[in-house]
Image: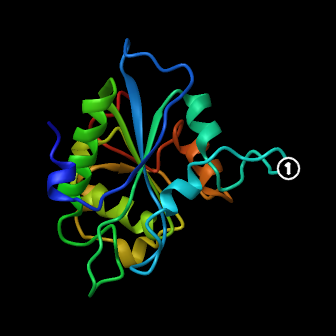
């Protein structure tokens, strides 16, 4: 049984399961790290993972239709909280928490471990840079949107993995571009 609820009893996961989902073959997984700080409400990932309403553009900050079009399972976990630290996705324990999130999703759905992606927006972009440094072997692509490279840069990162930069206008557009041309390609990438 997954450890997520035991280790993180307040954790919330927001899912988008594509309408084409079947358990054969296994699907790719995108973990969405949202922006915010320690005062951000814990339903924020759910806000971004909705389907756009009829009057909203397709590239609005709502990503459910994008997951559906790509066939990826989307999960938006609530960020770890440290009352003394605003960095959220870079706090101590983030790596273990994301490993528990992946384990939980794999327990519930058929996931191809070679097609795990992380995308971070704003403060989540800092977290994407963080997991690029600490766990590049776990993800096929790591996508950072509106995170600050200089503030989130750790020496040695580029010696271990390859990086490409994109600068689209919204995180939905960034994901659509990066799924084809990743910002950071992990060692699980088939390219």
Q: Residue at x 40, y 76 (%)?
A: 150
Residue in the image at 26% along x and 40% along y: 104
The x and y percentages for residue 110 are: 33, 23
Query: What is the basis of the colouring in this image?
Result: rainbow
Q: Would residue 73 appear left or right of 64 to someone viewing this image?
A: left
- From this view, report whether residue 155 is shown above or below residue 15: below
Q: Quadrant of residue 146?
A: bottom right
Residue 28 on image: x %, y %: 40, 30
Q: Which corner quadrant holds the C terminus? A: top left
- Farthest right residue? 55
Q: Which residue is mark 1?
A: 55
Name the spot of residue 158 as percent of width and height, x first. 30, 58
Vertical position of residue 52 compared to residue 168: above or below: above
Point out the image quarter for the N terminus.
top left
- Identity of the residue drawn at 24% across and 62% down: 94
Task: Indicate whether 115 appears above or below 145.
Answer: above
């Amino acid at each position: 049984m997954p450890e997520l609820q035991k280790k993180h009893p307040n954790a919330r996961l927001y899912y988008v399961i594509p309408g084409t989902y079947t358990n054969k073959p296994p699907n790719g997984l995108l973990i969405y790290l949202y922006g915010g700080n320690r005062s951000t409400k814990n339903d924020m990932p759910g806000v971004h993972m909705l389907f756009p309403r009829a009057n909203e553009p397709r590239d609005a900050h709502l990503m459910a239709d994008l997951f559906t079009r790509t066939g990826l399972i989307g999960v938006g976990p609530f960020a770890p909280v440290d009352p003394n630290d605003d960095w959220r996705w870079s706090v101590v324990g983030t790596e273990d928490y994301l490993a528990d999130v992946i384990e939980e999703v794999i327990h519930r759905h058929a996931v191809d471990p070679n097609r795990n992606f992380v995308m971070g927006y704003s403060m989540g972009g800092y977290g994407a840079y963080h997991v690029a440094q600490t766990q590049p072997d776990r993800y096929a692509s790591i996508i950072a949107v509106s995170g600050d490279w200089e503030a989130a840069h750790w020496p040695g990162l580029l010696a271990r993995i390859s990086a490409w930069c994109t600068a689209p206008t919204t995180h939905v557009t960034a994901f659509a571009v990066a799924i084809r041309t990743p910002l950071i390609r992990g060692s699980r990438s088939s390219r």
